[in-house]
Image (spheres, rainbow, N blue to C red):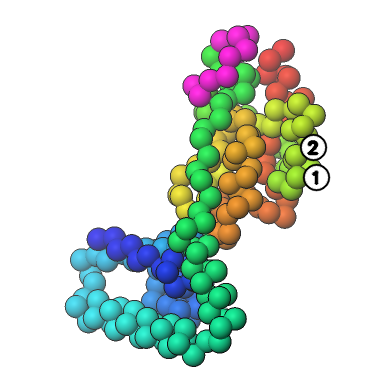
Amino acid sequence: TRLTLYVGKTGIDGDTFKNEYLMDKYGIQINKTSRNTVLFMTNIGTTRSSVAFLIEVLVKIATELDQQREDASRVERKLIEKRVKSMSEELPPLPDFSYFHAAFCPGSEQKVKTTDGDIRSAFFYAYDEENCEYITIDEKTIGAMMKSGRELVSASFVTPYPPGFPILVPGQVVSEEILAFMRALDVKEIHGYNPEIGLQMFTEDALKKLQA
């Protein structure tokens, strides 16, 4: 059984709630976290005492947070309210799927933007490191490239938690909407993306080779 606990109204993000409040203090393991939720998993081996302990811990944490809020100064309360609003209301809108680059579309000689593409060939084409490069998502780097008219094409799956499904797949063209979503995210778990080196993209030469 999966149990999703919404923590947005605490002003604490899911990752912090998991590590600092559950794992470090009480040794409670969490399956997954999102920006404002934590996910518990129970199974046939979960005992009544384990469930009772979890409920007891959650009541303790709620009491502690209520007390902290009562003891907070006016300035501190404003900061808490700001975090709560960020966690519960100011959520970045999910981006729409853009389109596949012509190199990975059947009938690619037709310059039609389509959501139908060959993910498989794009996925395996990225196995050759010579076909790929890494580009950071800051405005100065990737923004300048897009303004110059270059189509930037993802060479990997990029999956943030939340939402837990890919916002980029191999062969897909990166859009401004997708970049805005990634920049607005404050989650630490984004599969397929390393902020230090950037997004894995196909080089221009690699794409031209496919279309030659």
Query: Which residue is painted at 64% across and 51% down in the image?
Result: 183
Furthest-front residue in this view: 74
Q: Quadrant of residue 140?
A: top right
Magenta range is 107-116
Residue 146 placed where, x, y %?
74, 33
Residue 150 placed where, x, y %?
75, 27
The amino acid marked with disc number 1 is Lys
Q: Which residue is mark 2?
A: 144
Q: Residues within 10 Å of mark 2 (few under 14, many from 20)?
A: few
Instruction: Determine whether the residue tagged by mark 1 lies in a helix, strand or loop.
Output: helix
Q: Is residue 121 visible?
A: no
Camera-side residue of 95 and 99: 95
Whether pointer 2 and pointer 1 mark residues with C-beta atoms closer than 8 Å, the reply is yes
Residue 182 shows which numbered tag? none
Q: Quadrant of the N terminus?
A: bottom left
Residue 15 placed where, x, y %?
50, 67
Q: Is residue 115 above or below residue 140?
A: above
Q: Is residue 115 above or below residue 134?
A: above
Camera-side residue of 50 and 123: 50
Query: Which residue is painted at 53% across and 20% down in the image?
Result: 114
Q: Is residue 74 visible?
A: yes
Query: Which residue is painted at 62% across and 23% down in the image?
Result: 101
Q: Quadrant of residue 178?
A: top right
Residue 118 placed where, x, y %?
52, 23
The amino acid marked with disc number 2 is Ala
Furthest-bottom residue in this view: 71
User: Marks 2 and 1, Cα distance to the nearest angstrom?
Assistant: 6 Å
Q: Quadrant of the C terminus?
A: top right
Magenta portion: prevailing SS class: loop
In reply to whether residue 204 is colored magenta, the answer given is no
Q: Which residue is mark 1?
A: 140
